[in-house]
Image (cartoon, rainbow, N blue to C red):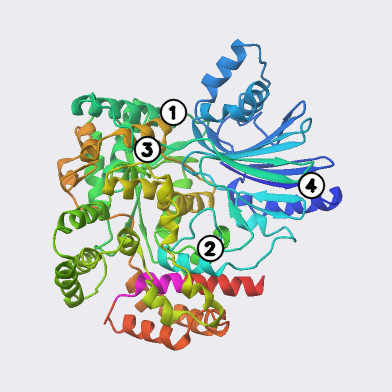
């Protein structure tokens, strides 16, 4: 895994060479093994390398003739592509996947993108055509941010690199702040900065150096509407198993030590078992994080999974455990600096600690990310199904019945039964078109009206549900619950889940690969009838059937817990004093972003246990840290 940066159409080569080094150095954590630079009279490129494939000869930027490439990521099928290129006369000087991109471009121009299988962001500079192409993988495993300034285009893997360019505007997008408080992440293609954008997943950016013009086009979009009529369930089970095994096998290719993450969940158990079988008779190392707080600790479930995997013929699985303590403020602020904008999924803290723990031994880890979105693993899909089934009730009756039920239940946190029921009843009382967004919204409009200060006055009128409604026209699924799943694939997955793991892993130079996000697996999952994925209330139904032999019976019916952290308690105990001073004494309140009196009410309500405001308070805390960092930058 790596970091890339670029400055296109600059004023002074000397200045560009100096700035590209600053941008690249700021991202050194992503590639601790080597650095490389390229510049001519128009383009400057920088690269930081985490050596995984072709350690000796895979240095970047890589140039052949008029073509120069920088790549962040892995092309899993590069060997097959190389053989095809060699068969038609291409000659290679290295064993790297980066060089394959050069030859593909020479052969096909930008039309080679559909051939790639992997996780990547890359830039191809064609000097003869005075053109730079940038592309991002289909699902968005690897990030790219950019901005235009006059006739220049500046890009980087992370905002921390982009911020080293003196022309980057720090003008904050208040609507993005509003969206962040609702979702805990800033939806793509936006960032916290009004003039900085993310390259969307599955997109190609074409920049013409002569004219300074930029164009974007999608090169892939999965079709959830196509459902093969003749596919029998047992045939689908066998095909899914084969695709996942094939995907895991592709991701076991590395010239460095490799292992797997193993939690108490079905997804990581499948990946760990499949990897262990494919690696046999070599050993497979598995890494598990636990908490002292039993409500969040999954070590017993992980041990159960490990014991079951060890019974598979020829398998040697070695498990490593570490108990995770409350993330410190230093860790939180450090991760936020690497992200470069507000991000409030608290599970990034244990994810980062797990990655650091695994990095002591390995350079590459496999994870189970993506299965929940593709195979309907979240409780919220069941909730949306119940909503559809209750819609036959008169709207007024449903609103009154479930609204009252939600109001009388105590809000003690979503990991408690009353908290889960409260959230479900609130959904069932919703008769609007934005029911799914309302289910996920951590800061509803009625809260924002009282919470937003003078700086956020215009953002009160911004409807954050537009994040979902603007995606709606592109959704292909016909089933209502499956549309929620498809929506998550193109919003929550690239907006929250993947940036979380990318930041957590890259902060310590660990590459994380996700077999469930292989193109073939994604497209097959999309083609499955909804009842294969959500069968009654059984989530990930076909995935459980396909891997019934490697999943312990105890885990099959176990409620999903996720990689949660006890934020509510941390805000009342471990973090209380630091959080309070950060929230109230910094630019969050003094700068007019948030009304101090309303914030004090929320804080008091949470501290006394009258209500759990941990999600919103964490988002506000993250925003406060970001604003204070901006002021001191």
Mark closer to the chain start, 2 or 1: 1
Q: Can residue 377 be seen in this snapshot?
A: no
- Give the residue at mark 3: 516
| The N terminus, quarter of image | top right
Q: Say whether marks 4 and 2 touch (CB < 8 Å).
A: no
Label 1: few (<14), some (14–19) or many (≥20) C-alpha neighbours in 10 Å = some
Across and down, in percent, residue 525 comes to 32, 35
Label 3 residue SS = helix
Horizontally, residue 607 falls left or right of residue 340, namely: left
- Give the residue at mark 2: 336
Residue 233, which numbered label?
Answer: none
- Give the residue at mark 4: 9
Label 2 residue SS = helix
Label 1 residue SS = helix
Mark closer to the chain start, 4 or 1: 4
Mark closer to the chain start, 4 or 3: 4
Q: CA distance from mark 1 to mark 3?
A: 12 Å
Horizontally, residue 62 falls left or right of residue 614, namely: right
- Give the residue at mark 1: 250
Across and down, in percent, residue 219 comes to 53, 35
Horizontally, residue 53 falls left or right of residue 516, namely: right
């Amino acid at each position: 895994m790596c970091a890339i940066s670029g400055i296109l159409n600059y004023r002074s080569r000397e200045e560009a060479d100096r700035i590209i080094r600053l941008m690249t150095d700021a991202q050194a954590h992503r590639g601790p093994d080597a650095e490389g630079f390229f510049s001519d009279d128009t383009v400057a490129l920088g690269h930081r390398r985490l050596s995984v494939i072709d350690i000796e000869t895979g240095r970047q930027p890589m140039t052949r003739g008029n073509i120069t490439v920088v790549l962040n990521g892995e092309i899993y099928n590069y060997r097959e592509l190389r053989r095809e290129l060699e068969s038609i006369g291409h000659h290679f000087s290295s064993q790297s996947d980066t060089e394959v991109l050069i030859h593909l471009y020479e052969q096909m121009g930008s039309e080679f993108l559909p051939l790639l299988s992997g996780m990547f962001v890359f830039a191809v500079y064609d000097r003869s055509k005075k053109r730079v192409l940038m592309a991002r993988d289909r699902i968005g495993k690897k990030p790219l941010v950019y901005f235009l300034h006059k006739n220049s285009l500046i890009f980087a893997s992370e905002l921390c690199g982009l911020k080293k360019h003196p022309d980057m505007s720090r003008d904050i997008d208040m609507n993005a702040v509003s969206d962040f408080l609702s979702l805990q992440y800033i939806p793509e293609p936006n960032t916290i900065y009004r003039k900085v954008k993310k390259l969307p997943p599955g997109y190609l950016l074409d920049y013409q150096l002569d004219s300074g013009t930029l164009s974007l086009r999608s090169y892939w979009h999965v079709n959830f509407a196509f459902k093969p009529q003749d596919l029998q369930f047992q045939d689908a089970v066998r095909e899914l198993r084969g695709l996942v095994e094939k995907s895991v096998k592709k991701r076991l290719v590395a010239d460095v030590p490799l292992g797997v993450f193993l939690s108490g969940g079905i997804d990581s158990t499948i990946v760990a078992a499949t990897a262990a079988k494919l690696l046999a008779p070599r050993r497979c190392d598995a890494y598990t994080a636990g908490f002292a707080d039993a409500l969040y600790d999954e070590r017993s479930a992980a041990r159960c999974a490990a014991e079951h995997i060890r019974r598979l013929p020829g398998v040697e699985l070695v498990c490593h455990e570490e108990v995770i303590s409350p993330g410190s403020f230093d860790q939180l602020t450090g991760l936020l600096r690497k992200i470069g904008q507000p991000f409030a999924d608290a599970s990034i803290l244990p994810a980062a600690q797990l990655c650091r723990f695994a990095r002591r031994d390995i350079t590459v880890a496999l994870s189970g990310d993506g299965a929940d979105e593709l195979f309907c693993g979240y409780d919220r899909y069941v909730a949306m199904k119940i909503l559809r089934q209750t819609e036959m009730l008169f709207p007024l009756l449903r609103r009154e019945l479930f609204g009252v039920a939600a109001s009388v239940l105590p809000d003690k946190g979503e990991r408690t039964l009353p908290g889960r029921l409260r959230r479900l009843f609130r959904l069932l009382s919703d008769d609007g078109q934005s029911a799914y967004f309302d289910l996920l919204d951590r800061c509803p409009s009625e809260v924002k009206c009282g919470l937003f200060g003078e700086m956020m006055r215009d953002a009160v009128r911004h409807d954050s549900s537009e994040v979902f409604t603007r995606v709606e026209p592109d959704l292909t699924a016909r089933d209502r619950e499956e549309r929620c799943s498809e929506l998550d694939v193109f919003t929550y997955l690239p907006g929250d889940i993947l940036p979380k793991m990318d930041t957590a892993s890259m902060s310590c130079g660990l590459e994380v690969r996700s077999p469930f996000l292989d193109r073939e697996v994604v497209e097959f999952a999309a083609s499955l009838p909804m009842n294969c994925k959500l069968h009654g209330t059984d989530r990930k139904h076909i995935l459980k059937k396909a891997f019934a032999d490697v999943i312990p019976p105890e885990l099959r019916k176990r409620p999903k817990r996720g990689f949660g952290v006890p934020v509510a308690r941390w805000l009342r105990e471990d973090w209380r004093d630091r959080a309070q001073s950060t929230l109230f004494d910094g630019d969050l309140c003094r700068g007019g972003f948030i009304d101090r009196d309303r914030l004090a009410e929320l804080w008091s309500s949470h501290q006394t246990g009258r209500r759990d405001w941990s999600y919103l308070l964490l988002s506000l805390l993250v925003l406060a840290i970001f604003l204070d960092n901006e002021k001191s930058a």
